[in-house]
Image (spheres, rainbow, N blue to C red):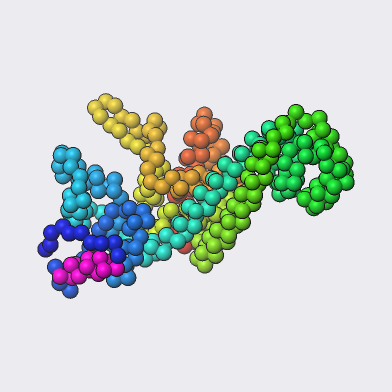
Amino acid sequence: MTDVFTIANHRDGFETLLQRIHSCTRPSDIIKVGLEATGHYSYNILGFLLEEGMPPYLINPLHTNLYRKSLSLRQTKTDRIDARTIATMLMSGVDLKSYTDTAYHNEELKSLTRYRFDKVRERAKLKTSISRLVNILFPELETLVPSLHMASVYTILSEFPGAKQIAETHLTHFKTVLSDASKGRYDREKAVEIREAARRSIGSAMPAKSLELRHTIRLIRELDKEIAEIEAAIKAIIDETAPPILTIPGISYRMGAMILAEIGDFSRFDSPDKLLAYAGLSPSTYQSGNLNASGAYAHMEKRGSRYLRYALFNAARYVCVWEPSFAAYLAKKRAEAKHYNVALSHAAKKLVRLIFALQTSGRAFQPA
């Protein structure tokens, strides 16, 4: 038995913790080590405990908070009280799952998928800036090309960042740049069309905006390279395991990897309902007297990982396109006068149950 104590966040501190554990236990004792999930701050101590053969119990701070409130009505929270609360939870028989070596190594995949998510979101913001700048410098261009966000269009805008620059360039030079950028898809006729539109353009001649456009394109190209590198690293990890989730039509290795990374060890969940709750897709329930806000009128809890919900909803959208039974299920929910997003949320729940069944059984998807 020992009182609450503090350790430093380095090797000596971790060794001190290990010594204190051994000093107050016997070899025959069952040792449980619990700690609150604190993101990257807990990653190193988790690895240390796993190396020492002590799989820790990683507890959601919300769970700890609710448990502490169930023991006392006093609104008191300190590190000492939290430590005692965790110890009480470990001894009380509360249903907790230990943190496994699989979950620890899954952190690399989670780190990569979240890093990619942030990079893609950053690139999307830059693409919005491209649209804004072109609308100022050469608004007519958007009607002359399939999309502003094409490699060929970026190449043209990098050299001629505005209607004024295109209008003033020699047609032969512009045609050559356009043809090279589009790999021969755009000919002299297209070059004439774009240059004539530039000469009649209402776009403003603003050197500052042209400079910003050039720099923004450069940033997008750098992000493209970084995202491709991240995706290659993700694919290398996924290819080693060949998870059954990738056999579901419509799920790419990117979305599949993100779902697997956020869920981690499937053995932590006794049923798909537990997984739905973890993803924040289970309906909330509030009942008091004659008021019963559950079932069809309840909102989703939206707790858990926002990355997981994002990946599940995006995956469900594509699965409903490529897998006939999911397409029929989505159509059925739409026929019940449900909004598309509500119907999609039902499809996402169905997808979670399918993923749980495949990943826990190790079987590939079989069409109905």
The percent position of residue 287, horizontal first and vertical second, equals: 28, 31
In front: 111, or 350? 111
Q: Is residue 110 left or right of residue 79?
A: right
Image quarter of the N terminus = bottom left
- Residue that protrudes farthest toward the top in the picture: 290
- Residue that protrudes farthest toward the left in the picture: 1
Q: Is residue 84 left or right of residue 54?
A: left
Q: Residue at x 27, y 56 (%)?
A: 35
In front: 64, or 81? 81
The number of discs equals 0
Q: Is residue 276 left or right of residue 187?
A: left
The percent position of residue 263, horizontal first and vertical second, equals: 42, 54
Instruction: State which quadrant residue 40 falls in.
Output: bottom left
Q: Residue at x 40, y 37 (%)?
A: 300
Does residue 255 show up magenta in the picture? no
- Residue that protrudes farthest toward the front in the picture: 207
Q: Is residue 344 visible?
A: yes
Q: Is residue 259 left or right of residue 90?
A: right
- Residue that protrudes farthest toward the bottom in the picture: 27
Does residue 17 show up magenta in the picture? yes
- Which stretch is magenta? 11-23
**Residue 106 vertical position relative to residue 200 in the rendered view, above or below:** below
Q: Residue at x 15, y 70 (%)?
A: 23
Q: Main secondary structure of the magenta part?
A: helix
Q: Residue at x 79, y 40 (%)?
A: 166
Q: Is residue 249 visible?
A: no
In front: 156, or 151? 156
In front: 6, or 352? 6
The percent position of residue 341, horizontal first and vertical second, equals: 51, 35
The percent position of residue 90, horizontal first and vertical second, equals: 21, 57
**Residue 147 vertical position relative to residue 265 in the rendered view, above or below:** above
Instruction: State which quadrant residue 199 falls in.
Output: top right
